[in-house]
Amino acid sequence: MEWIKALGPIIVALVAVYTLSQDTGIMLGELKESVNNLDKRMGTIEMEVRLLNTKFDGLQVTALSPKLAAN
């Protein structure tokens, strides 16, 4: 009968560990989703920067063209 009383705290500890692991898994899933969203935003920003660089390169070529034509 004593061993049944000894199992009580062990069962409570196992349930607590299981519950914490489930919560941690949910948090890790949410963190992964947040990182994926951040990666997508960074990709969008990189594309916008490339477009701006392309536009500025075009402006520089346009600005240099009269100088080149004058030479």
Image (cartoon, rainbow, N blue to C red):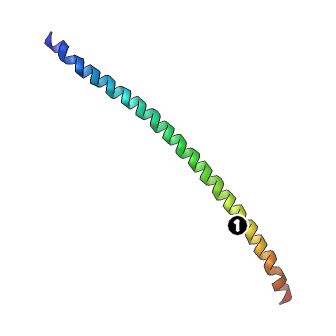
The three-letter amino acid code for the residue at tag 1 is Asn
Q: How many marks?
A: 1
Q: Which residue is mark 1?
A: 53
x, y percent for residue 39? 57, 50
Q: Is residue 68 left or right of residue 32?
A: right
Residue at 60% x, 53% y: name it.
42
- Residue reaching furthest to the left: 2
Residue at 54% x, 43% y: name it.
34
Location of residue 29 with respect to 17 vertically, above or below: below
Q: Is residue 56 left or right of residue 24?
A: right
Residue at 69% x, 58% y: name it.
48
Q: Residue 53 occupies which quadrant of the picture?
A: bottom right
x, y percent for residue 57? 74, 71
Q: Residue 51 occupies which quadrant of the picture?
A: bottom right
x, y percent for residue 52? 71, 64
Location of residue 16 with respect to 69 vertically, above or below: above
Location of residue 24 with respect to 68 vertically, above or below: above
